[in-house]
Amino acid sequence: MGAPTLSEVSMFGIEPPEPRTFRENDLITVIIAERASLSRTQKEEQEKNYDMKGAVVSFPDMLQMLELRLENGRESNLPKIDLNYDNEYEGEGKYKREDKLTARVTARVLEVKPNGTLLVEARTEVNSDNESQLIVLAGLCREEDVTDQNTIQSSQLFDLKLDIQNTGDVRATANKGWIPRIIETLFNF
């Protein structure tokens, strides 16, 4: 005979629950708490110098040119061409972005892998006052990472794919029209 278990000798001992198993189409709540920040700085300096010189040795006679006869005209003291070009460019750019997303979505178990890993996917669409937000989430998680409250943190999902699309009046006013985009393209340097 083996040693007695705690629940056999104690009035307060409780049997641990059986390990939880999941099947396809079970639902799990994913708590999304994602934060990303990006900061970039760039500085550039360019200098271009061109020097071009030329001289006209002979010029066609205008009267013959009008008569469509092209012959060399007489040499004259026509001005020489001298062209200098200098271009300097100095540019500096800074870009900073910080994103923070918190949400709760219910995901469906699409597949239970042989080792117990769960493939989950969630789709949530919210429409309000001509605004629409679509959240699509997919990833892999371990069965043991799902809490007793049937939740899991988005940071515990492997190969997390999170796509958020916003459409509506507010999003449309945030986009630049085609005239400002053309002007920015022309005067981008």
Image (cartoon, rainbow, N blue to C red):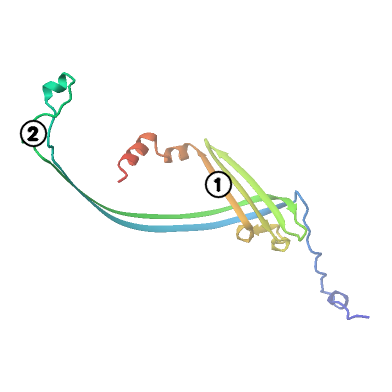
58 or 119: which is nearer to us?
58
Circles 1 and 2: CB atoms closer than 8 Å: no
Give me the disc on residue 164: 1
Give me the disc on residue 2: none
Q: Residue furthest front?
A: 71
Q: Secondary structure at mark 2?
A: loop
Look at 12% across and 37% down and name the residue there. 57
In percent of width and height, residue 149 lies at: 70, 59
In percent of width and height, residue 22 lies at: 77, 56
Say which residue label 2 marks. 75
Image quarter hosting the N terminus: bottom right
Tag 1: amino acid: Ile
User: On the picture, is 162 further left or further right than 28?
Assistant: left
- Number of marks drawn: 2
Q: Residue furthest right?
A: 1
User: On the picture, is 7 further left or further right than 119?
Assistant: right
Tag 2: amino acid: Glu
Tell me which label, 1 or 2, sits earlier in the chain: 2
In percent of width and height, residue 121 lies at: 67, 49
User: On the picture, is 157 further left or further right than 37?
Assistant: right
Image quadrant where residue 157 sits: bottom right
13 or 164: which is nearer to us?
164
In percent of width and height, residue 139 lies at: 65, 54
The relative height of residue 167 versus residue 11 in the rendered view (above or below) is above
Neighbour tally class for label 1: few under 14, some 14-19, many 20 plus, Cα within 10 Å: few
Look at 42% across and 58% down and name the residue there. 39
Q: Secondary structure at mark 1?
A: strand
64 or 131: which is nearer to us?
64
The relative height of residue 26 versus residue 54 in the rendered view (above or below) is below
Q: Residue furthest left?
A: 77
Neighbour tally class for label 2: few under 14, some 14-19, many 20 plus, Cα within 10 Å: few
